[in-house]
Amino acid sequence: MMEGEGSATAEHRTAEEVLAAFEALSPDDKMKLIAVERKFLGGTGRQKGEIYREALCRALLGERHCPRELPVIAFLIQTMRSIASHDRERQSRQTSLDPDDMAMTEASRLSTGLASDQLDPEEHLLAKEDAAAADAVAKIQGHFEGDEQCQMVLLGWAEGLRGKDLRDFVGVDQARLDYLGKKIRRKMDKLYPNGWRQ
């Protein structure tokens, strides 16, 4: 028995359960995973499909444990986000340790960073706000245990999906999406009466 395997099976899915749940995903759900992965690739040095495959491998090898109450698609998206974030941090550290980079002026370093990310200052500010929103989404996601559609809406919001992209991601029409959005907002207002950014 692998270390931690006993506790993982009580609260978390086993590797076999993750594999079965993954294989049971519809082709549309698997395409959603690939589409979300594309949003994570920037600044990672990865190619299309690499983060997706690594997230699945980590789950199957027991390196990441999927909580039973979390839909497998949501777990894989969170794992991909984590992998991409660590890759960006690693890329950033390698760049800052590069002797050529150390010789650059602060202004040229800033412009190089912006050019490599293809973001202007306004987009950097929006990216920071998106990161804060993603943290808030992760906080409240646990309050929707067992409600897969609400969890998918929250994941979609965290990934910046809106309109048709969000409807396609969740697999609902606009009326249902509006209902789910109101349901989430009502619960957020109840849980965080002073606002979720506190």
Image: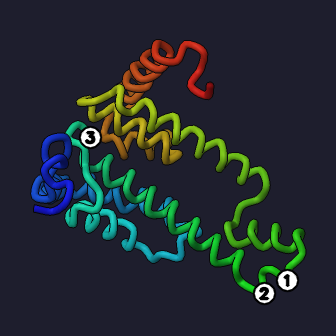
Instruction: Please provide percent x and percent y for residue 147.
Output: 27, 29
Instruction: Please provide percent x and percent y for residue 83.
Output: 44, 63
Q: Is residue 164 left or right of residue 126?
A: left
Nearer mark to the viewer, of 3 and 1: 1
Q: CA distance from mark 3 to mark 1?
A: 47 Å
Q: Are marks 1 and 2 in contact (CB under 8 Å)?
A: yes
Q: Is residue 79 left or right of residue 107?
A: left
Q: What's the amino acid at mark 2?
A: Asp
Q: The residue tagged with tag 3: helix, strand or loop?
A: loop
Mark 3 or mark 1: whose residue is earlier in sequence? 3
Q: Give the residue pinned by disc 2.
A: 100
Q: Are marks 3 and 1 in contact (CB under 8 Å)?
A: no
Q: What's the amino acid at mark 1?
A: Ala
Q: Give the residue pinned by disc 3.
A: 70
Nearer mark to the viewer, of 2 and 3: 2
Where is 139 relative to 12, above or below? above
Color theme of the render: rainbow
Which numbered disc covers residue 103?
1
Instruction: Please provide percent x and percent y for residue 144.
Output: 33, 27
Name the residue located 30 percent from the left edge and 41 percent from the top edge.
Answer: 171
Q: CA distance from mark 2 to mark 3?
A: 45 Å
Q: How many marks?
A: 3
Q: What's the amino acid at mark 3?
A: Leu
Q: Residue furthest bottom?
A: 100
Q: CA distance from mark 1 to mark 2?
A: 5 Å
Name the residue located 71 percent from the left edge and 83 percent from the top edge.
Answer: 98
Please rate how many residues cluster around mark 3, counting C-alpha atoms within 10 Å: few if below 14, some from 14 to 19, many from 20. Answer: many
Mark 2 or mark 3: whose residue is earlier in sequence? 3
Q: The residue tagged with tag 2: helix, strand or loop?
A: helix
